[in-house]
Image (tube, grey):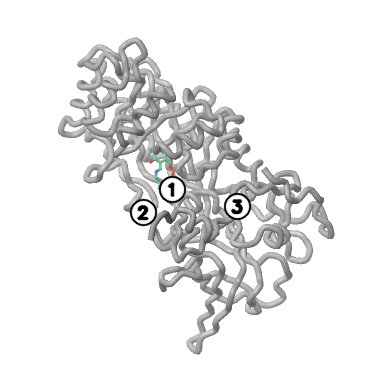
């Protein structure tokens, strides 16, 4: 770990004006157009570490973990590592008392190597490799989510009755929710989970229950991602509690856990809705109490798996403008040094973002500008119709908030541009967490020609 900036930022008033969501709570605009996050100037960080740069506000991650713990003191909160994972992130989440939801051997190994206890992890995935299951067993991952019939004997063979593997069965509550069809996973007709309708879920449950080396501890579902209303969770809860009652009636067992997955939405644009942990907690808890009372069931422990809601608001992406093109038909394209290789979300889902000039005063009136990436595709547009100063020029810095989830974790090696560096900021200090990927990293993987 390299602490590169231990100096206080100079020349700015320490207070500045808060920017508000979707920027991190610590974001302050100060004199000269500088923007402080975690007390660190983004322009100064860009000069020091280069661009594109991903800045993670450690206090924002921690505050968001704490908000979940406080809102759901009886529940188990697992951070969904797929949103973004590195060793520092694993540390923060562990220290704040959350567990971890992992979906691959890579996430599992990285977190375990960082010291995250596997006994606080849950592994899920629709296509786990035999090696992943073996690794999970060897490291004693606490729970594994069953997502296919073939997994049941495979996992049963790896476990032994003396030390049974705790499992959940992933079911489809038949609830459609989420920002894009590609992430709506709670409905029939896609690859995840077992349908309740038609008996697939009942069959999986039965097959798990007869395995002496597996212990069924609950039901799991995940509706989708970037959900901003509580209603879909209530609808799913109704279906799952009904199924819990059915299992009790048929098999005489009351399962102690109910995992509602993740999907909690955040603000990307200033007017966006977000799912408030406190509101979610109050309404889900009330509904769970009511439904369990109706069926005469003991209250299962609630499990939630927020990823984006913990990581996205803590991240800010900083790009340098490489060129500004004004066309005869009145369009303005500001091309930056990143793009779909560090943030594929606009190209994949049409996701919207906001963007702001940092590092100098704007001076000129805002004009409609498309912030485009540097990749060889017309669809490589990071922000459509951004309002940026008319005098924007090459060399300027642009910052994009809500960049902490599903950007770095989905970043690619396209055009061999290399994935960006990641810096953590806290109390006016910045430290490099992940260095920029270079062509030497690509070359290092080449072992033949
Ligand atoms: N649990 C399960 C089983 C999941 O599949 C996911 C996300 C989560 C939890 C966490 O969901 P979150 O709270 O972060 O929404 N690449 C897409 C998002 C894909 C989410 C996949 N599963 C995007 O950029 O919007």
Coordinates of residue 14 in the picture (x, y in percent)? 81, 52
**Quarter of the image where ligand 1 sits:** top left
Marks 2 & 3, CB-CB < 8 Å contact: no
Task: Quadrant for residue 299, please give it.
Answer: top left
Residue drawn at x 58%, y 60% as measured from the top left: 400
User: Which is nearer the N-term, disc 3 or disc 1?
Assistant: 1
Q: Nearer the viewer, residue 419 or 102?
A: 419
For the C terminus, the image quarter is bottom left
Q: Is mark 2 within 8 Å of ligand 1?
A: yes
Res 359 label: none
Coordinates of residue 159 in the picture (x, y in percent)? 32, 19
For discs 3 and 1, the disc positioned in front in the rendered view: 3
Q: Is mark 1 within 8 Å of ligand 1?
A: yes
Coordinates of residue 131 in the picture (x, y in percent)? 34, 33
**Secondary element at image label 2:** loop
Q: Which residue is mark 2?
A: 180
From where the camera sits, is residue 67 visible? no
From where the camera sits, is residue 199 visible? yes
Marks 2 & 1, CB-CB < 8 Å contact: yes
* Distance from Cα at disc 3 to Cα at disc 1: 29 Å
Q: Residue furthest bottom?
A: 328
Q: Residue furthest left?
A: 198
Res 226 label: 1
Residue drawn at x 73%, y 65% as measured from the top left: 33
On screen, 251 above or below 93? above
* Distance from Cα at disc 2 to Cα at disc 1: 9 Å
Task: Quadrant for residue 316, please give it.
Answer: bottom right
Q: Which residue is mark 3?
A: 435
């Amino acid at each position: 770990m390299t602490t590169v900036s231990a100096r206080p930022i100079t020349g700015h008033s320490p207070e500045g004006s808060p920017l508000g969501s979707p920027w991190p709570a610590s974001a302050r605009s100060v004199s000269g157009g500088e923007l402080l996050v975690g007390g660190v100037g983004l322009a100064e960080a860009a000069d020091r570490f280069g661009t594109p740069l991903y800045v993670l506000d450690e206090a924002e991650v921690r505050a968001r973990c704490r908000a979940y713990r406080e809102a759901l003191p009886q529940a188990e909160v697992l951070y969904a590592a797929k949103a973004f994972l590195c060793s520092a992130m694993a540390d923060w989440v562990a220290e704040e008392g959350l567990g971890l939801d992992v979906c691959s051997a890579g996430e599992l190994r990285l977190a375990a190597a960082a010291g995250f206890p596997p006994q606080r992890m849950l592994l899920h995935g629709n296509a786990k490799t035999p090696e992943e299951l073996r690794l999970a067993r060897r490291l004693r991952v606490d729970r594994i989510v069953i997502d296919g019939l073939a997994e049941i004997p495979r996992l049963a063979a790896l476990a032994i009755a003396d030390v049974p593997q705790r499992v959940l069965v992933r079911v489809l509550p038949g609830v459609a929710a989420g920002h894009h069809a590609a992430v709506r996973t709670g409905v029939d007709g896609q690859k995840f989970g077992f349908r309740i309708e038609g008996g697939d879920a009942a069959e999986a449950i039965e097959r798990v229950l007869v395995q002496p080396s597996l212990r069924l501890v609950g039901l799991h579902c995940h509706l989708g991602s970037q959900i901003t209303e509580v209603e879909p969770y209530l609808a799913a809860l109704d279906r799952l509690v009904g199924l819990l009652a059915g299992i009790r009636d048929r098999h005489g067992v009351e399962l102690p856990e109910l995992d509602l997955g993740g999907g909690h939405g955040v603000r990307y644009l200033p007017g966006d809705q977000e799912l408030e942990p406190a509101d979610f907690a109050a309404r889900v808890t009330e509904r769970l109490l009511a439904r369990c009372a109706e069926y005469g069931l003991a209250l299962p422990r609630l499990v939630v798996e927020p990823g984006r809601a913990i990581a996205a608001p803590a991240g800010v992406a900083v790009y340098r403008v490489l060129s500004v093109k004004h066309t005869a038909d009145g369009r303005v394209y500001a091309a930056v040094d990143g793009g779909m290789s560090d943030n594929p979300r606009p190209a994949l889902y049409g996701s919207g973002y906001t963007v702001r000039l940092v590092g100098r005063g704007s001076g000129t009136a805002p004009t409609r500008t498309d912030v485009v990436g540097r990749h060889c595709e017309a669809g490589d547009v990071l922000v459509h119709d951004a309002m940026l100063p008319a005098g924007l020029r090459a060399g300027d810095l642009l910052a994009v908030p809500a960049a902490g989830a599903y950007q770095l974790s989905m970043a690619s090696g396209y055009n061999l541009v290399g994935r960006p560096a990641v810096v953590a900021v806290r109390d006016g200090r910045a430290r490099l967490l992940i260095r920029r990927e270079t062509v030497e990293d690509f070359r290092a993987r080449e072992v033949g020609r």
